[in-house]
Amino acid sequence: MFSSVLDFVFRYRSHARLLRQVAPGWSIVSLFATLVGAGSSIMGMVATGQLIGALYAVFAHHTGTGTMWAWFAVFAAATVLGQLQQAVLSMSNPRIWARYRVRINDLIVEAGLHSQSLAPLDTEFAGDLENIAISSRHWLFRFGLTGTWQMLQIRLIGLGSVIVLAGWRWWVPFVVAAAFLLSSRAMSHWIEDLLDALFGNSPPMGRQRADYLAKIMVSTWAAKEVRLFGMVSWLGERYRVLWTQAAGRMWRGSNRRLRPTFLGVAVLLVVLGGALALLAHDAYRGRVGASSLTTYVLALLALDAFGMQPDAQSGLLRIAGMLKQLGGTRTQLGLPPLSNAPEPPARHPLECVADIEFDDVTFTYPTRSEPTLRRLNLYIPAGQSIAIVGVNGAGKSTLIKLLAGLYETDSGTVHVAGKDAFSDAAVRGAVAVIFQDFVHYPLSLRDNVGFGALECRSDTAFLERAMTDAAASDVLARLDRDWDTVLSPQYAGGTDLSGGQWQRVALARALAAVGAGARILVLDEPTAALDVRGEAELFDRFLEVTHGVTTVLVSHRLATVRRAERIVVLDGAAGRITEDGTHEELLARGGEYATMFALQAKRFAQAGTGES
Amino acid sequence: MRTVRALWLVIVTTVRVAPLQSLLCLAETAGSALRALNPLFYGLFAVGAVHHDATQLLVAVIGLIGTTAIQMALSVLGNNARLRQMNTIGFVFSHRIATIMGSIETLDHQESPELLDKLQMFRDYSGAIGGGLNALLGLLNTCAWAATSLAVALTADWRLIILVVLGIPRILLTGRTVGWDKEVEEQGSPHSRRVNELVDMSRGLDAGAEIRVFGLQQELRRIIRESTWRWQLPTIRYARNYMLLDLINGLVYFGAAVGILGWMLEDAIHGRIGVQTFTIAITALATLQSVSGNIVGAVKWAGDAVRSATRFVWLQDYAEDVHRRYSGVHQPPAILRQGIRLENVSYRYNDADSDAISGVTLDLPAGTVVAFVGENGAGKSTLVKLLTGMYAPTSGRILIDGVDLAEIDLTEWRTRCSGAFQDHANFEFTAGESVGVGELQRIDSEPDVLRALHAGASDDVLDSLPDGLATQLGTRWPDGVELSGGQWQRLAIARGMMRAAPLILALDEPTSALDATTEHALFERYAAAAHDAAVTLLITHRFSTVAAADLVVVLEQGRITEIGPHKILIAKGGTYAELYKLHARGYS
């Protein structure tokens, strides 16, 4: 039994530690209420027996009723206390769980954001973190939270019953409790396996595939194509087939476990029956008095506290499992298992204009076998505006990610202002990037722009300048200049922006970063969603805005690219730079750039401008 | 009303899916009821001991063991059945929800905060309908236990009927909590949604890159902590209500119970009732006390379950309501003879203050390539969605060879449409399936998929895949391969090329992430293949492509401002000519 209590404590150690961390005061309140609850249960049990005994004594021996009424008072107090304890828990539990959830989410998010390198998110860590996040939202998790004190109270009542019964024959409660534990072990093996397969943190692949199909059907991102191609019944049927297969496998495994469970129950019944018979025998012989008898009977049956407690226990197990997985994943990512890492020091942006140097850089993505960049060399002097062109998948975005210090190179170095881009903290904050797949934060306009320069986020004039520079003034006008409008129609009062408007907001974000001191501006397809007028408007302002900043532009629009001081062509097959020069130089050279430009230009020539 | 329907639906579905399992689910209930008989045997035990009556003691022991044994066996059986049923029901409803969501005819619902809130609740309480069955059974168990305990108490003494009477307001009060729970859930839902979105972001590659570049890690964490707290705050606000409820229960109900027991004790002293009766009464009360702890929890879970089921019924009603509006039965024409005509078509998004498309009248003759030009937000994509039946016009008509689209079977109509979009889906199936879903009847036909890949200028995507068409896409799957943004986009284009002879081929900026060479190759093929499709709708920012269209439509703020072939519009010297020259200048 003690081992069971220890097991309880040990298994839920992380859970208990988190409770203490997040809400020490309220946890003590709940713990106290739980102790009172368990105590009043035991007290009730003892008082019931004593009361009946005293009542019998009043009859049989005509003793006074004083003792009897005293025990009745104890019984009354225990009954009412047991209810008051509930009221206290109703107050304290929501307070604990709110803080607990905040902490759990923070731990999950910290794990995803911790590493400077993006590589962990490119591997199975992302999947692990997704599973953890899903189970933290699962109803079994909620079950576990509410079940925590319930479970503790049940176990404490069990312990109290053992102590009560020790007054009769000390070994009996141990034997009965052991039998309860045995049956509960058999049962929990069965039920845990089952729950693990049903709601586990890492469900079998077959179920994951099935769930993915269901996700497609309800998703926003696939809604248009699901309808256009009439995919629903196909997806639905596949979902059914995959799910049925997965479920069939699971139940076959589970049914095998049922037999030991029944065996455990049978053993328990024999032992419990024996104990009750022994008690009856002792009572018959007069070895157990009338006042203790009922208490003992109640206590014997209360030993089922050591048995399986399906709902609360499975919920708690889920929490323990999730914490274990979270702790494991965090440890692998170099974080303390369940406490926060120290906050990184604040950024100190570079003071000077920065040059960029790629020196013999080779890089392979974690999930690929072939390197994307092979021995790439590129020097960009401080303040230059350079454009990178190349076919899809040539590695332009990769180059940018290395420059931003998001991956570590296989070999070779990337230096910004002479400092290593990946390992030197001084470089962070020096590079502002607008990515091709920039983020639509479901937050206010202020956040969406101000995220480029957190320290200036409350400076509306500063943000407004960034918006103007990004040719996004009309977005601001559309929102009635309300910087707190949420940019997502999914929230009350929120609104959505069109693709082009979003792009300008993202651009404003990057320009805000430049305004706050970033020395390098990287633009990956910054005008993909802009129309020709918007694009022209933007680039006309650009030289002015990016004065004194090293600018790297990636674009498929060669009409845009030609405005750059220098153009380099990245060859996907070779993984390095194959052409380098100004627009005119490259055209004159007649290489790949010239071919691409001619292709795009030809189509205009064919259509004619109507001027000739 | 919906609540009743919802409950009925869960029960009927449960029984229909597996009648035997459903019956076994009730085993636990029977066991709980049996357990409540224990006080009878406690009484017998006490009397037997006092009177040295071996028979009474024996009966008591056998009785206690018997109830325990049967209860345990029933509980194992019931638990097994319950989990099984819960799993199955969870799936059945998840399948239904997915099917309904996927087949609601229009897309308006994707933009409605109200609906999205409800859907988020489906996700937050995912499996809740399956779990709901669990909760309902739990409530049933608790009630059976409570009822039997009370019945046992009543056999001991008539006064205990007072407890039954007092129990009624108590149950009514507990019923109030269902309403509170609902309010808590609804107040927290938007925050919960935001938390989910942001937590998902924290492990995404795209967001991860930006967050690191701008050093937003700590800020994002702060926002998530704050939103989580706001999501949870309503539970704290309502805590006081629950506390008061518990207090009333404790003081009034159990205070009364203790009073009655004291009264009985007084009677017992005077010999008006026996020790056995008193024992039964007092132990039955203890049982009631433990049941009482369970009741609030059971009601809460059952309330959650019923709400989930009610939401499902709501979704069903909503889908049906939408469905009724699309009652078209006509078959779409086999080939388009005249073309498509928009007559005074307007469209307004939910809650928007102005029309996205306003009074558009337009003829799209069969066999033409029509390019839409205009700023972002001018209504180009909306027009495409109207033509493919994703939205229904707020007013006006769309005529397909003279037949109103509203009178055509929408599903059939869609089988005659195809397209590719900038915001395409990345289906993590095998590469072949990811393309093949564009025409499900030929999804397994390798030649067709290869042809579509070729038509979409995507052959070289295939070359980069280790197992060709059989390559699993997406790194989360075993041996899955991640594609670049451009590669995904080209698979989406190939998907749009699967259908043999669509009446409408909609290309909504599908080439934004493509380089010049690929784009060029693609448009050459469009141009060659265009006349297979009856009407090709083209949205692109690249004027070189626009110029090749038969008809150019210029949109401004949801209205057509210019329309005609490229040459004529250039000659006219309006907006189009200006934009075109602006673009062409870059290539001169």
Image (cartoon, coloured by chain):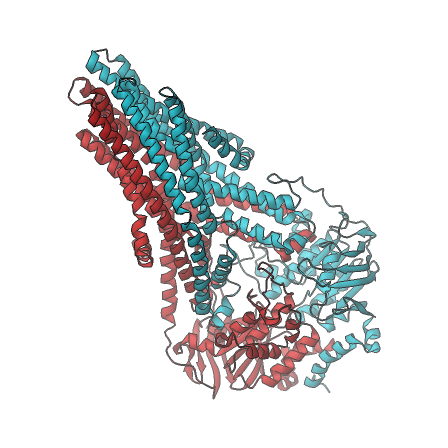
Quarter of the image for the C terminus of chain B: give it.
Answer: bottom right
A584 on left or right of B570: right
Q: Where is residue B583 in the image (x, y as percent from the top left)?
A: 70, 76
Taking the view exactly as shown, the residue that stands out farthest to the left is: B272
> Residue A546 in the image: x percent, y percent?
76, 60
Q: In which quarter of the image is residue B150?
A: top left
Q: The cyan chain is which one?
A: A
Front position in the image: A47 or B243: A47
| As drawn, B183 above or below B495 | above
Q: Inspect this view and state whether residue B234 appears.
A: no
> Looking at the rendering, which quadrant does residue A121 occupy?
bottom right
Residue B291 shows in the view: yes
Is B320 on the left or on the right of A336, as rendered?
Answer: left
Q: Give the chain coloured red.
A: B
Question: In this orientation, which residue lies closer to the viewer: A212 or B167?
Answer: A212
User: Where is B150 relative to B329, above or below?
Assistant: above
Left or right of A587 on screen, residue B277: left
Q: How many labels does the image show?
A: 0
Give the residue furthest to the bottom: B337
Instruction: Give the quarter of the figure containing the N terminus of chain B.
Output: bottom left
- Report whether A65 appears left or right of A436: left
Q: In this view, does A67 lie above or below A345?
A: above
Q: For this rendering, which residue is in front, B329 or A288?
A: A288
- Residue B517 percent coordinates (x, y): 70, 76
Q: Where is residue B136 in the image (x, y as percent from the top left)?
A: 33, 47
